[in-house]
Amino acid sequence: MHVVVTGRNIDLTPSLKEYLTDKLQRAQKHFNHPLEIQALLSVAKNPSIAHNQTAEITIKVNGNIIRGEESSENMYNSIDLVADKIERQLRKFKTRHWQRKKPSFEKEPSDEPVDVSSDLDTDEAVKKAIASEDIRSRIVRSKRFPLKPMTPEEACAHMDLLGHDFFMFVNSETVQVNTVYHRRDGQYGLIEPEV
């Protein structure tokens, strides 16, 4: 496992890095190859934010991105929360994508209730919970609209006027399709294709 830790508004002490690495070791047990993990530990300077210490983890697995973010009043608590979240996501990913005997379009939902309350941390409990739900993804609505050339700032204004969480547009500066979105911290994000 290779972990790259960066900090924003926080001193990355060796004990904090070691604690994070130890917590992420549980995620590695689900895979035979070493995971490439990027971690961002940040502290918001705004005193009005109660949960101001955030831990973000990003892992690339076979071309897929697994990401988790958690905030609390204490960085160690944030690391605990995000490590648990990432482990659940990785276990779910591995169970759904690697250990399925039938393709998802052949899988039939089960009507039997599954009791996973006894031990939620075992792989078997997760497999039973996933098998009990209808996991087929469906596109339930399709929408077509013209993409207008505009700047990212104009796209943010359009997104706010529409009341949407994201907005696709053609970036007038790069002539590529981009997406702007609302971040949890109240700011905006921009997604650009990598070429």
Image (cartoon, rainbow, N blue to C red):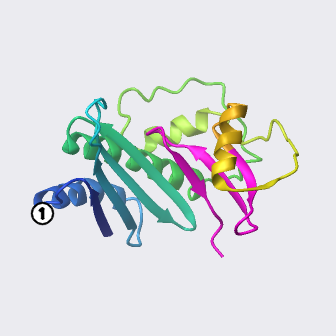
Q: Residues within 10 Å of mark 1 (few under 14, many from 20)?
A: few
Residue positioned most to the bottom? 195
Q: Is residue 61 left or right of residue 153?
A: left
According to the picture, the residue beneath numbered tag 1 turns out to be 14
The front one of 131 and 50 is 50
Q: Quadrant of the C terminus?
A: bottom right
| Residue 101 visible to an observer of this rendering | no
The front one of 172 and 116 is 172
Q: Is residue 158 left or right of residue 146?
A: left
> Can you give x and y, in whole percent of width and height, for residue 99 in the image?
56, 56
Q: Is residue 186 magenta?
A: yes
Q: Tell me what residue is drawn at x 65 percent, y 54 percent.
A: 152
> Can you give x and y, in whole percent of width and height, for residue 26 in the image?
30, 55
| Residue 22 visible to an observer of this rendering | yes
Q: Tell me what residue is drawn at x 69 percent, y 58 percent.
A: 178
> Can you give x and y, in whole percent of width and height, for residue 11 in the image?
16, 57
Magenta region, residue range = 167-195
Looking at the rendered structure, the secondary structure element under dot 1 is helix
Up-down: is 19 above or below 51? below
Q: Is residue 73 left or right of residue 149?
A: left
**Label 1 amino acid?**
Pro
Q: Tell me what residue is drawn at x 32 percent, y 39 percent.
A: 71
Up-down: is 14 above or below 184? below
Q: Quadrant of the N terminus?
A: bottom left
Q: How many marks?
A: 1
Q: Tell me what residue is drawn at x 47 percent, y 39 percent.
A: 184
Up-down: is 3 above or below 109? below
Q: Is residue 130 left or right of residue 137?
A: left
Q: Is residue 92 magenta?
A: no
The front one of 133 and 114 is 133
